Image (cartoon, rainbow, N blue to C red):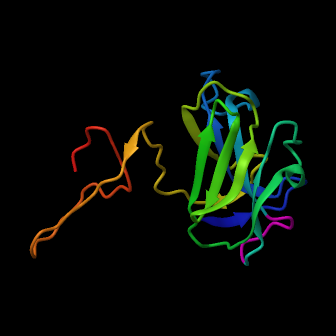
Amino acid sequence: YIDRVENVGDYDRTGNIYLGHDAGGSNGPCSGTAERIAALGFYDPDGGDSGSDLELRASENGDAFGTTTTWAQLATGISYDEWHTVRVEVDVAGGTYDVFLDDVLVGDDVGYYTALASVTHISFVADSDARGDFYVDNVFGPAVDRYDLSVSKVGSGTVTVAPGESSYEDGASV
């Protein structure tokens, strides 16, 4: 949910999403470029707080971090003040990741920002280079092996699944 993007220099973005690890241990996870395999942000070239001119962009290896226009454009026409689902599937060994916006693949095999051996953290950032207001809800990092739940009903009974996740880790009670 992007509420506002501040028009600042060549940044004009907010809601940065970083995936990586916490190698430094002192400034928080994904705090430095060496700790990020993925760097995404919501961009509006003029800043703003209404309309549907937001873009989802990804910074790949070699992109100028301070100039969002150099980042790969993944999706356009994104509306302010609406909830959107962002899903990132990382191929650590391959050094790429896929990005889905509202269940539509918008970034296929996006190049890494920094090559990493593992991903252990996700960070959502608004700071000096990502100014604006945004909201985050329902963050989920699945276990390595997830399984779909198959429900069969006999008769007129009902089945309540709790927790109501889309998939479950091995041994989960539902």
The magenta stretch spans which residues? Answer: 44-50
Task: Give percent across and percent down for residue 24.
Answer: 65, 21
Nearest the viewer among 64 and 131 is 64
Q: Relative to residue 47, is residue 40 drawn left or right?
A: left
Dividing the image into 4 quarters, which one contains the N terminus? bottom right
Q: Is residue 66 above or below residue 103?
A: above
Q: Measured from the top left, where is residue 119 in percent x and y? A: 58, 32
Count all numbered tags in the image, as a single digit. Answer: 0
Tell me if 83 is positioned left or right of 145 in this view. Answer: right
The image quadrant that residue 62 belongs to is: top right
Q: Is residue 37 one of those drawn in magenta?
A: no
Residue 97 percent location from the top left of the image: 67, 43
Q: In the rendered view, tell whether residue 170 sits above or below residue 164.
A: above
Q: Image check: 11 left or right of 1?
A: right
Which residue is more in the foreground, 168 or 125?
168
The residue at 73%/28% (across/down) is 115
Residue 59, by quadrant, is top right
Compared to residue 17, the image places residue 46 above or below, namely below
Q: Position of residue 25 (x, y in %)?
A: 60, 22
Residue in view at x 86 percent, y 64 percent: 45
Q: Residue at x 72, y 76 (%)?
A: 50
Q: Residue visible at 41% across and 38% down?
A: 145
Task: Give the dominant element type of the magenta stretch: helix, strand or loop.
Answer: loop
